[in-house]
Image (cartoon, rainbow, N blue to C red):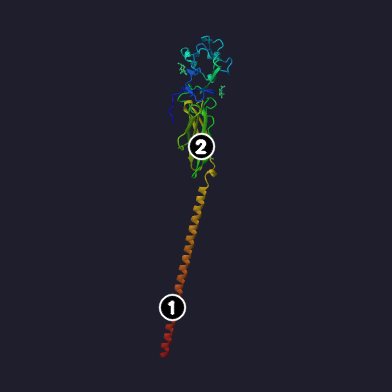
């Protein structure tokens, strides 16, 4: 679990698109001042150039114009009034970066830095704003804010990935989001399940995170599992549930049960059969013994009779 950072966190992700791949995004807090980077290619002085910073999606599109060695803000869009400046002392180094102060949510957009006299050099800077959370406090409840806050995870996806032994492997993935989400698994009772390894994290060029986590679950009476994604800084929480049908769990366990039962029945049958056989043998043996005994007795009796007869006759 992450420690709550006492709010006010908000994100600005700045990255160059198109021409400048591999530029690390810049992250800042709302209300902060931010620098949109732009540098002349050949490290020549920009003092005598004209530098046009624009936001093509706005009307008027002018963000900041510098020409004839001074700022010309007549055409500037009023939303930027008093919030833009160039670093005058840096111009001679070819540094035409724009400083934008007190950043607002409405500043989201693509900014172009255009130097007409230098082969029409144009740099596009994308400014992403993670939205202000400065009204959020530590008491603000966690809930689904994917419709209010840009960068809040909107759709974690659960995939039943396969089997491991007689357990099922689940994967949860949440993509394109900022700040970095924390992902965890819960069972039907809301108990946190240990994940199969640490959460995998990657970032795209715009600084958006994609997180992936695996869990290995055994069969239970209610195979309902939840993937929970939280972005504590923006008080966002999104859950996704999956019900794994019983049939998904490998048949091997059924086979095992079947084989076990069969073996048990067989053993019992053999044992029972042997017992009956033994009993029969014993009975037969006893009977035979008894018959032969009785035969013996009869013989003795006959002999006695004969003897008595003999004795009588002799008398
Ligand atoms: C341009 O100047 C600003 C202000 O001094 C600085 O922060 C920034 O790093 C410079 N950019 C480059 C590419 O040197
Ligand atoms: C900025 O440019 C990027 C990449 O070309 C594009 O995906 C995005 O929609 C643009 N943003 C705005 C606000 O026009
Ligand atoms: C699983 O249990 C949860 C809560 O105990 C319940 O809301 C859900 O409907 C159950 N699902 C199934 C498929 O039994």
The response on whether ligand 3 sits within 8 Å of label 2 is no
Name the residue carrying label 1: 296
- The span from disc 2 to disc 1 (Cα, nearest Å) is 86 Å
- Percent across and percent down for residue 4 are 44, 27
Which residue is found at the position 47% from the left and 70% from the top?
A: 284
Quadrant where the image shows the C terminus: bottom left
* Tag of residue 5: none
Please name whichever residue, 164 or 67, is drawn nearer the observer in this view of the structure. Answer: 67
Please name whichever residue, 46 or 74, is drawn nearer the observer in this view of the structure. Answer: 46
Tell me the quarter of the picture where residue 301 sits: bottom left
Helix, strand or loop status at disc 2:
strand
The reply to whether residue 193 is visible in this rendering is no
- Percent across and percent down for residue 137 are 46, 23
Give the class, few, some or many, for how many residues have Cα within 10 Å of label 2's Cα (few <14, many ≥20). some
The response on whether ligand 3 sits within 8 Å of label 1 is no
Please name whichever residue, 272 or 103, is drawn nearer the observer in this view of the structure. Answer: 103
Which residue is found at the position 47% from the left and 63% from the top?
A: 274
* Tag of residue 171: 2
Which residue is found at the position 46% from the left and 73% from the top?
A: 288
Q: Earlier in the sequence, mark 2 or mark 1?
A: 2
Quadrant where the image shows the N terminus: top left
Helix, strand or loop status at disc 1:
helix
Q: Is residue 18 above or below residue 46?
A: below
Give the class, few, some or many, for how many residues have Cα within 10 Å of label 1's Cα (few <14, many ≥20). few
């Amino acid at each position: 679990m992450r420690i709550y950072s006492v709010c006010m966190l908000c994100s600005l992700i700045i990255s160059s698109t198109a021409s400048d791949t591999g530029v690390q995004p810049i992250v800042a807090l709302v209300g902060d001042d931010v620098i949109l980077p732009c540098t002349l290619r050949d490290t020549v002085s920009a003092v005598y150039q004209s530098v046009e910073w624009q936001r093509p999606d706005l009307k008027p599109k002018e963000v900041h114009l510098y020409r004839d060695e001074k700022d010309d803000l007549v055409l500037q869009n009023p939303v930027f009034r008093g919030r833009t400046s160039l670093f005058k002392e840096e111009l001679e180094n070819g540094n035409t970066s724009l400083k934008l102060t007190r950043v607002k949510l409405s500043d989201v957009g693509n900014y172009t830095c255009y130097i007409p006299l230098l082969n029409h050099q144009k740099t596009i800077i994308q400014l992403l704003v993670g939205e202000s959370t400065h009204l959020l406090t530590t008491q603000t409840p966690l809930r689904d804010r994917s419709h209010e806050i840009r960068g809040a995870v909107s759709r974690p996806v659960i995939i039943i990935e396969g089997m491991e032994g007689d357990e099922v492997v689940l994967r949860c993935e949440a993509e394109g989001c900022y700040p970095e989400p924390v992902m965890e698994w819960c069972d039907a009772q809301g108990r946190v399940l240990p994940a199969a390894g640490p959460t995998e994290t990657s970032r795209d060029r715009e600084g958006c995170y994609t997180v992936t986590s695996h869990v290995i679950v055994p069969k239970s009476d209610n195979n309902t599992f939840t993937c929970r994604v939280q972005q504590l800084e923006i008080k966002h929480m999104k859950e996704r549930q999956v019900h794994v049908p019983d049939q998904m769990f490998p048949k091997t366990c059924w086979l095992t049960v079947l084989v076990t039962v069969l073996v048990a029945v067989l053993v019992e049958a053999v044992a029972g059969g042997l017992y009956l056989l033994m009993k029969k043998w014993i009975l037969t043996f006893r009977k035979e013994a008894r018959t032969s005994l009785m035969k013996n007795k009869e013989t003795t009796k006959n002999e006695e009779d004969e003897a008595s007869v003999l004795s009588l006759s002799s008398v």
